[in-house]
Each structure stands twice: as C-alpha cells, then as structure tokens.
Image (cartoon, helix red, strand yellow):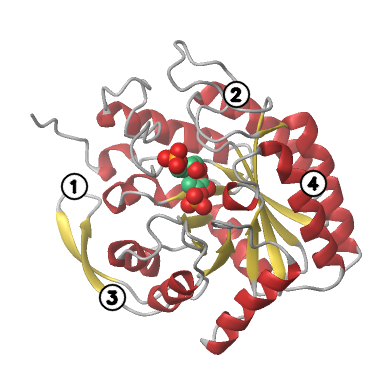
Amino acid sequence: MQDTLPSPAEVTAGVVPDVARHRETVSAVLARRDPRLLVIVGPCSVHDPDGALEYAGLLAGAAARYSDDLVVVLRAYLEKPRSVTGWTGFLPDPTLDGKGDLAAGVRLGRRFLLEAAGMGLPLAYEFVDPVLAPYVADTVSWGAIGARTVASQPHRQLASWLPMPVGMKNCVSGRVGPAVDAIRAAGAAHVFPGLGVDGRMKTLRSTGNPDAHLVLRGGLVPNYDAESVAGAVGLLGEAGLPRRVVVDAAHGNSGKDHDRQPGVVGEVARQIRDGGPVVGVMIESYLLDGAQDPERVPALRGVSRTDPCLGWERTVPLLEELAVARRGR
Ligand SMILES: O=C[C@H](O)[C@H](O)COP(=O)(O)O
Ligand SMILES: C=C(OP(=O)(O)O)C(=O)O
C-alpha cells in the first residue's frame, strides 16, 4: 500500500522568522566570536504540539532573561531514531498509534515548528530520515545527526548540504572517532540523491558545512568528565578540526535518568568556569518530570513519551547555573 505525500513545496509556505539570524548566532557561539554559551533544551520528543508550545513559551521567557550569557535553542524534535522499534515521532506518526499518517504529520509538524519559531526561539531538530529533511529544514537553526546514524553516509551528505550548524553525536557505544569522521565528511562537498521541494528526486550538490561540530552524549559510560572531554578535543585537534564540544547531559551521560542531568550540568558548568572547550550544553526538559508509558491512551500532556525529561521547575536553576558559569569563564 502506498499513500502519496504532499511535496515539500506544498507544505513549506510561510516565512520562518529570524532563522538566518539565529543560524548566524549559533555559528558565532560555536566559533567563539560570540562569548555566550549554547544551551539546547526541550522535550526529548514532541508528541502534543499544544503542550510543547506551552513549554516553548516558558523557555522563550527564560531565554530573554538569560540572553546576556546564553543562546537558548528549543529542542523541537519531530522524529525519533529507535534502538530497535518504538514510536518514531510526531512527523511520521502524529496520531501516536502506529497508523503512520505522514501526510498529516508533515502538515501538523510544520505548523508546530512555525508557531514555535514565532515565539522567538531558534529551533533544534534531529534529522533522522533524510527524505523528510526538506519538509522541516528551513525552520531549523541547529541540527543534529544522532548517535545511531552518525556513521551513515546519507546522513553525513545531508549534513554537508544543510544550511545550519550540525552537531555530530558520538556513537551509542561511546566511540567518538565516527563523529569526528562525520564532521570531516560533512565539511566536504558531495553529490547525492535527495528529495527536491517539488517532490521529485534530485541530484543534490553540497558545498560542505563549515559548522559541523562534536556532541558528547556518553555511551556505555559517560563522557562529560574533564578527562573525556580533553580526549575528545584531542581527537578533533589531530583531525585538524576546531577544538570545541557540546555536551549532552541526557542519554549516555545520565543513563537516561533525568535525575542525573543536574549533576552532569554542574560538572560541565565547573569546566566552563575553568575555561574548558565546552561551547554548549544539551538538556532534555519538559513541563513535568519523568516519562509516561508510551502505550498510555490518551497520552498525558506535558510528560515525555520517549526518554524521561527534567521538569520545567528543575530546569530553570540549571539555566541560572550555566549563565553564572559563563560569566565566570
Ligand atoms: O532520545 C531518545 C531515545 O534515546 C532514542 O530515540 C532511542 O530510544 P530507544 O533506545 O528507546 O529506542
Ligand atoms: C536520540 C537522541 O540522542 P542520541 O542520538 O544521542 O541518542 C536525542 O537527542 O533525541
């Protein structure tokens, strides 16, 4: 069975506010032309656009309060990579029940992205399926290639073509080498097949992404400690790449236990104060603490249905801590 999807051109109408400026700001922070710290924060996945927009409103207020020290980017993740199987995100399955109504997903997902961008926040997005990239890329100011796809040639080629800084995550095992290779690959020009905005397959020609960078997300063991960060930065230096990293406080760095994220952020804040190479931090945060059973119908509002998140009340002190650390650098 096949359903026809609208072409990207049919759903991407609408101007995305400030995206060029946001991308330039993120790029400047990564290159340290802007002394602030990048903080990529928000739900593991968006399952309920209304709840995520409520969160975005809170975050936009905090982002304005901390704007002297932090460049805050909203995690607006509409696709989820899976270790084996599971819900693959709002864009491929907006009804959360496996029906896979992608046509509705691209329309509703896009509406969410435009509304979130309209709140003044730059958006972060993990590009899981390269075919879906043209439906969302124009809204995104920071992209991720995740731990499960960082060694994939199509994803590296996509990153070389994307017009925003892209973070390459270390592998699920913890290996950093493939992410360093991915940064190098994304920095080069490629010719590859991809979906055009008119919905037809094209030969895409990229010129290389100058802003690809490393994200340490832990693996079998965490890698946010100063020694691991120094080791990763050493690999970047050996490859002739800028010595800068973003640290993800969730995933392998917290063992997917949201209660451990504040401890990771605390240690990273200490490294920032000491002048270490950390230019950004990722936090999985939503309105309420924890995660819900993905089988629950209807899904709860404000609680993650993928990885457990830190609730909003416990997120604000982490933003404060990072802002203070940045000032002390
Ligand atoms: O970020 C979310 C999850 O860690 C990712 O989608 C993988 O989840 P899984 O290991 O439960 O499949
Ligand atoms: C899936 C994610 O991360 P990772 O690729 O590090 O597992 C994520 O950030 O949602």
Q: Which mark is residue 190?
A: 3
Label whose residue precedes the other's in the sequence (3 or 2): 3
Q: Nearer the viewer, residue 85 or 77?
A: 85
- CA gap, disc 3 to disc 4? 38 Å
**Foreground label between 1 and 4:** 4
The amino acid type, in three-letter code, at marker 2 is Val
Are discs 3 and 4 less than 8 Å apart at CB?
no
Does the residue tagged 4 have its C-beta within 8 Å of any atom of ligand 2?
no
- Give how far across and how far down residue 125 sits, in percent: 48, 48
- CA gap, disc 2 to disc 1? 35 Å
Q: Element at badge 4?
A: helix
User: Disc 1 marks which residue?
Assistant: 199
The quarter of the rendered structure image containing the C terminus is bottom right
**Foreground label between 2 and 1:** 2
Q: Is residue 175 visible to us here? A: yes
The amino acid type, in three-letter code, at marker 3 is His
The amino acid type, in three-letter code, at marker 1 is Gly
Outermost residue on the left side: it is: 1
Please state the total of marks drawn on the protein image: 4
Are discs 3 and 2 less than 8 Å apart at CB?
no
Q: Nearer the viewer, residue 152 or 101?
A: 152
Label whose residue precedes the other's in the sequence (2 or 4): 2
- CA gap, disc 1 to disc 3? 21 Å
User: Disc 2 marks which residue?
Assistant: 303
Within the image, what quadrant is residue 8 found in? top left
Q: Seen in the image, is 49 located left or right of residue 286? A: left
Q: Which mark is residue 77?
A: none
- CA gap, disc 1 to disc 4? 41 Å
Q: Element at badge 1?
A: loop
